[in-house]
Image (cartoon, helix red, strand yellow):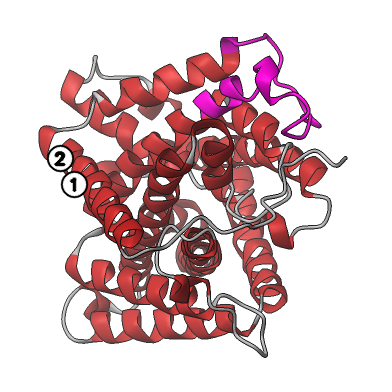
Amino acid sequence: MLIALSFAEVGSRFTGTGGPYLYARAAFGRFVSFEVGWMLWITRAASWASVINGLMDSLSFYWPALAAGAGRPALMTATVTLITWVNLRGIKLSSRVINALTVGKIVPLVLFAAIGLFFIDASRLIPSGPPAFASVTSATVLLIFAFGGYEVVPVTGGETRDPRRAIPFAMMMTIVFVTLLMTAAQVVALATLPDLARSKTALADSAVTFLGAGGALLITTAAVFAMTGNNFGQSLSGSRNLFALGEHGDIPGVFAWVHPRYRTPATAILVTGAVALALALSGTFTTLAIGSAITRLFVYAVSCAATLALRRPRFAGVVNRPAFVAPGGPLIPAAGALLSVGIVAFATPRQISVGVAALAAGAALYVVTRLAGASARRVDEGYLEEG
């Protein structure tokens, strides 16, 4: 919530497409903003790849062949292709699909949590002892993935009605709702399913214990809707990140190409889908989830810092005044930035090296693009004060 409140304030200054990329560009300049946009795109591609592996794991509850073998990559490829095609056809179609899938996942999860609370064994909620420090730190990094995603809300600001007011509300309500629903589901699963840690389909296995086979089908359906909707969201927001980099001349302009009929960033959509599929076919859910968490922590830290930076007097009259201001002066964005940096310290050296390698690859691409003669484009970024 500390990070979301910071995003809500800084996001209420902007109306353009790009989200954290635009915040960093206004506050810290072109190179830092490029790295933020680049890392945000990598986060989306890795998240998409991670969740599609989770989707295959959920479907394997009824179709064991998806746990391994040729069926798994074939269905992954078909799913990514379909999502990419829908996203290519337009943001209205994509948003309608996402809204329908959201309803389809929320209703079963609410039923699971509400009914399951009557069947919990409270003794399972009593800790058996303090966990190992390594377990706590690895869980903390995974929680960043589990509760993350709200940073994509402002990315499509340029295609949003009244984004300066809609985005702050959406940021905060996302965290509140997700926290309540995920906590309730976690309590029910933990208190009804013995040996929870060994289950790859924890909610479906838990539902069997108090709802029978029909409950497992209900939850598996919800999981499929949830992860498919997540995939649509990753395609939608990730491609807009890549488009913003191309639109501003930070990477070759072909990535900013807009389809003449559908008015969507076609190149960015196709490349994002292809990279996500390649990552999905080569990794596992947990590995990709942790990689996604590490890259997004960089985005969180810079965005919180931008919230503080844009409050400085020198930006008055240049950047839009915020439609929402986080309370407590500098406390909330400063705490959000420090926590983001601090959680990275919980990662393993290998995980940190992946993040550093991603930053280095982005820097190399930036330098090559600049040497090739690309220059900053005059784009309406949605933050300049009118008049």
Q: Residue furthest right?
A: 387
Q: Residues within 10 Å of mark 1 (few under 14, many from 20)?
A: few
Residue located at (27% from left, 68% from top): 280
Q: Quadrant of the N terminus?
A: top right
Residue 246 in magenta?
no
Q: Position of residue 305 (x, y in %)?
A: 50, 24
Residue located at (85% from left, 42% from top): 386
Residue located at (67% from left, 38% from top): 11
Looking at the rendering, which quadrant does residue 55 occupy? bottom left
Region rendered in magenta: 304-331
Q: Position of residue 150 (x, y in %)?
A: 56, 44
- By secondary structure, the bulk of the magenta-drawn segment is best described as loop
Task: Find numbered disc 2 in the image and state the secondary structure of the residue it sits on.
Answer: helix
Q: How many marks?
A: 2
Looking at the rendering, which quadrant does residue 184 occupy? top right
Q: Residues within 10 Å of mark 2 (few under 14, many from 20)?
A: few
